[in-house]
Image (spheres, grey):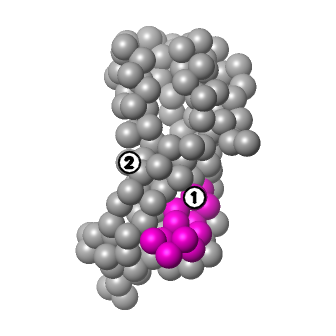
């Protein structure tokens, strides 16, 4: 499991001081970016010349509101690894151990040159497998 910590900012909230629903996806993507950077694959997963990993599906379940200045941790786990795709599960938890949001994204490995699905690189599969949900 990978853990990313954050604090809810004013810019993430609506006029009522509650996180605007779409901003939770940005927080999850920030956690995902740190997760990928930590992989240290020797190449940049975000700007590789040959393959990219776009999100093809995203869903969220909201259990409680997140409010301005709430301290949260985002627990990131790999849900599933397939030949050319993987899913990431994010649990957004308030400092008092209350799960507030559950998110899931599905990423597909695409050849950048022709936009065709291709197999995940072995080093990516290996890194993802180290963080698979148990």
Give me the residue at 71% from left, 35% from top.
80
Most extreme residue toward the front is: 96
Q: x%, y% of residue 25?
A: 47, 56
Give me the residue at 37% from left, 13% from top.
42
**For the residue labelled by badge 2, is the local secondary structure a helix, a strand or a loop?**
helix
Determine if the magenta segment contains residue 34. Answer: no
Q: x%, y% of residue 85?
A: 65, 28
Q: Is residue 51 visible?
A: yes
Tag 2 residue: 30
User: What stretch of residues is rendered in magenta?
Assistant: 91-103
N-terminal label among 1 and 2: 2
Q: Is residue 56 visible?
A: no
Tag 1 residue: 91
Q: Is residue 82 left or right of residue 72?
A: right
Q: x%, y% of residue 103?
A: 59, 56
**For the residue labelled by badge 1, is the local secondary structure a helix, a strand or a loop?**
strand
Crowding around mark 1 (Cα neighbors within 10 Å: few <14, some 14 to 19, many 20+) is many
């Amino acid at each position: 499991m990978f853990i990313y910590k954050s604090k809810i900012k004013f810019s993430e909230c609506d006029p009522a001081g509650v996180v605007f629903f779409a901003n939770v996806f940005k927080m999850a993507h920030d956690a995902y970016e740190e997760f990928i950077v930590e992989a240290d694959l020797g190449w940049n997963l975000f700007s590789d010349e040959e393959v990219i990993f776009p999100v093809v599906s995203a869903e969220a379940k909201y259990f409680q509101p997140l409010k301005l200045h709430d301290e949260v941790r985002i627990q990131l786990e790999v849900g599933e690894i397939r030949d050319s795709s993987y899913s990431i599960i994010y649990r957004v938890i308030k400092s008092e151990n209350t799960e507030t949001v559950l998110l899931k994204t599905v990423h597909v490995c695409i050849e950048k040159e022709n936009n065709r699905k291709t197999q995940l690189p072995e080093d990516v599969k290996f890194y993802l497998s180290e963080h698979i949900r148990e």
